[in-house]
Image (tube, rainbow, N blue to C red):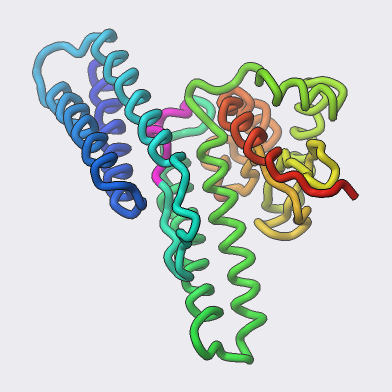
Amino acid sequence: MENKKKDYLTSLLSWADDVEGKINTIKLEKEDLSDWLNKFNDWKLLVEEKKESDDEITDESIEDLQIKSEKLLNSLTELLNKPRQADETLKPGNHKLPPLPYAYDALEPYISKKIMQLHHDKHHQSYVDGLNKAEKELYKSSPDDKLIKHWMREQAFNGSGHYLHTIFWENMSPKGGGLPDGILLSKLKKDFGSFEKFQTLFSKAAESVEGVGWAILLWEPRAARLGVQTVEKHQMFSLWDTVPLLVLDVWEHAYYLQYENKRAEYIQNWWEIVNWKNVKQRLEKAQKLQWPLY
Ligand SMILES: [Fe+2]
């Protein structure tokens, strides 16, 4: 038990390293960030002390560290959601891997730590690298005419991979599962008949993906309603001009180490960690896109 707690503290520290590694790549006002970083460093020190100490680690102290880490994460999310400068852009080839918004083992038992480490640090990183490479080739002053098709394919594959995974991490939470509420629940009921009907369609769609791909709940501004669409790889079967709200990765790298060929079991368990709060926020923002309905 004590070893398990030490392991948990180690995973909190590796999450902290990950956040720290990425934080300096995020554009924020220096004052805002320094205040947050002070609190973050205090918390990290507490975890380190607890880990090194020979005293017994109580359940209360673990819970206290968990609550503090959630507060830190919430305040960082608030900082990141501050309105951007209107003219702010990301130059081609400058995409970065976003930090995982929780520890690698936070989604256990539904998704194992090993899967999360490989999935985030290796797979997602490779999409970021691939997208940056493609953008640098496509948007340089004299791109190679003969390779345009190749780099377009690379941009679509890696770019969709990067953007979908970025949504996917936020779409899940150790405190997820249950039912959505508010506008999201009422829209799901209105557009699918009931929450259960939506959930069944989404799960069956995820099971139906041939080979590797995604199931996606999306907002269709041209119809002002919700829909479900699957994608093969990251970019085939795409439904363009829509806004993804909830995405489920059904590539084998997302579940095989833990579930082997039982994709349906992975999908069924995955509902326990869906972060409905995040999905609702995405819907509220997406609904602000008000286009003529056709
Ligand atoms: Fe993936």
- Residue for point 65% across, 72% down: 153
Residue 80 in picture, x, y percent from top left = 41, 41
Residue 26, relative to residue 176: is it above or below?
Answer: below
Residue 87 lies within the magenta run: no
Answer with left or right where residue 24 lies relative to residue 219.
Answer: left
Q: What segment is highlighted magenta in the picture?
A: 99-108
* 173 sits left or right of 216 in the view: left
Q: Is residue 155 above or below residue 175?
A: below
Q: To which quarter of the image does residue 268 belong?
A: top right
Residue 201 x/y as whole percent: 81, 32
Which residue is situated farthest in the left direction here? 54
Determine whether 107 is above or below 238 in the image: above
Q: Nearer the viewer, residue 212 or 185?
A: 185
User: Residue reaching furthest right?
Assistant: 294
- Residue shown at 46%/63% (left/top)? 90
- Give the main secondary structure of the magenta stretch: loop
Q: Which residue is found at the position 83% from the left and 20% from the top?
A: 194
Please state which of residues 176 and 221 is positioned toward the viewer in this rendering.
221
Q: Residue furthest front?
A: 86
> Going by the image, does 60 lie left or right of 175?
left
Q: Nearer the viewer, residue 3 or 202?
A: 202
State left or right for residue 227 relative to residue 164: right
| x and y, in percent, of residue 110 in the image | 53, 27
> How many numbered circles are shown?
0
Q: Quadrant of residue 56?
A: top left
Quadrant that contains the N terminus: top left
